[in-house]
Image (cartoon, rainbow, N blue to C red):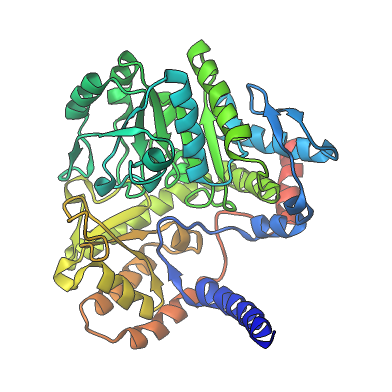
Amino acid sequence: MEEFFKTALELIEASEKHEVYRDAECINLIASEGLKSPAVKEMLRLTMDLESRYAEGENDLMGHVKRRYYQGQKYITVIENCVTDLMRMLFRCSWVDIRLVSGTHANLAVFKGLSLTTKSKKMVVTPLSAGAHISHDYTGLAGMVLGLENIEHAYSIRDMNIDPDKSAEIIRAAKPGIVTFGGSLFLFPHPVKELRDVAYEAGAYVVYDAAHVLGLIAGGVFQDPLREGADFITSSTHKTFPGPQGGVILADLRDERIEKAIKNVQFAVFPLSTSNTHLGRLPATGIAALELKIFGEMLAKQTVNNAQTAGQYLYENGLKVLGENQGFTMSHQLAVDVRDYGGGKRVAEELEKANIILNRNLLPYDDQNNREKPSGIRIGFQDVTRRGFAKDDIRYLCDLMLEVIRGKRKPDEVREDVIALRREHGEIKYGFQSLQEAMEHLQRSVKGI
């Protein structure tokens, strides 16, 4: 019994320490982690009862609640419908499903729903080695759970992107049911509009995994997948979209073909893959959508500017930043080859000692069977941008990183400078500082003031 209590005490202490360590003492450059505003955090705290509730059931072809199998739903229904509508209006589409609890869950539902629709087990995807998410791959959800057969897009290492001409030949030959774009290492817009007609001619639906770039899409600075020909967008809601952890699917109900697919995707959401849809996240997701409607363009532009500034600066100072011929990046991410400095694992661990948090990453030309020692690191700038970092801050941060990477200073020495830099940026920008501030803005907007 004493060991049980000690473990519980350790749990509480570690949780308290984590909040200080990662939120107040570290600079976060993980490309897959977002930063919530004070208003979004406040909304999460105010909706704790929702975390205990269930809302199983079916949705209509707008994504609104159609039928639920529990009582006590009158306000839950309003909440779900409002968040659905906010997402529909933000992304200018006619159908949204917000019941997904993660981006991987969104991929599961769409891949399953579309395989039911097409009766095909074939899916063309970006190679895992070139940045696809594990849920796209035959070694992950797509293959091991759904039994899909992966055929890989042709990929240009020079351009760090899908090769549209060669991929068109692959799609024509394979005649898949699904053609997938998007991923986790995602520097440049994928050739959706170049390949949509080829996909349609082959009988495939086009799926775009926007988990990393959804906030940039909302801000209008990356690409517009639905207008370029994607049938479905899948995404998480906690990377460049700065909400709580969760998932979403977007589509335009433009014809009978899409309607048939949406019905199968909805069936794959419920009853096939979910029961409790984690309702407590929904109101905060809606507030994040509101913030992107107001601040999203400024936030997206500054995020991309910061990533490009860092890419140019690191390159000028001797690092091998990929995508050089296209300006290093058009998203929130950079990919950097650090083989000359001990590889991605060593560099990420040394930077962690300095409280600079990023991840090691396989690069397209790496040995894919040696995942523990990749050549690269992946750097994301959405968190620091929301904390107010601009050009000079980014260059100074790069200087601190370079000192650690090159071994010019010990990580312990650099850590004090990192903590000081983090403390200079205590206010979260491009969002509301409280729910009251958000409500006052909405009331003025509604009144036309």
User: Which residue occupies the foreground of this view, 111 or 163?
Assistant: 111
Residue 169 relative to residue 53: left or right = left
Quadrant including the N terminus: bottom right
Compared to 187, does 271 lie above or below? Answer: above
User: Which residue occupies the foreground of this view, 216 or 170?
Assistant: 170
At x 45%, y 48%, the residue is: 300
User: Which residue occupies the foreground of this view, 372 or 434?
Assistant: 372
At x 38%, y 52%, the residue is: 332
Compared to 110, does 327 lie above or below? Answer: below
Residue 442 relative to residue 371: left or right = right
Q: How many labels does the image show?
A: 0
Work out which residue is located at the far top of the displayed protein and give it.
256
Where residue 70 appears, x then y in whole percent?
A: 80, 37
Work out which residue is located at the far front of the displayed protein and give it.
1
Whether residue 447 is visible, yes or no, is no
Quadrant including the C terminus: top right
Whether residue 259 is visible, yes or no, is yes
Quadrant of residue 398 within the rendered picture = bottom left
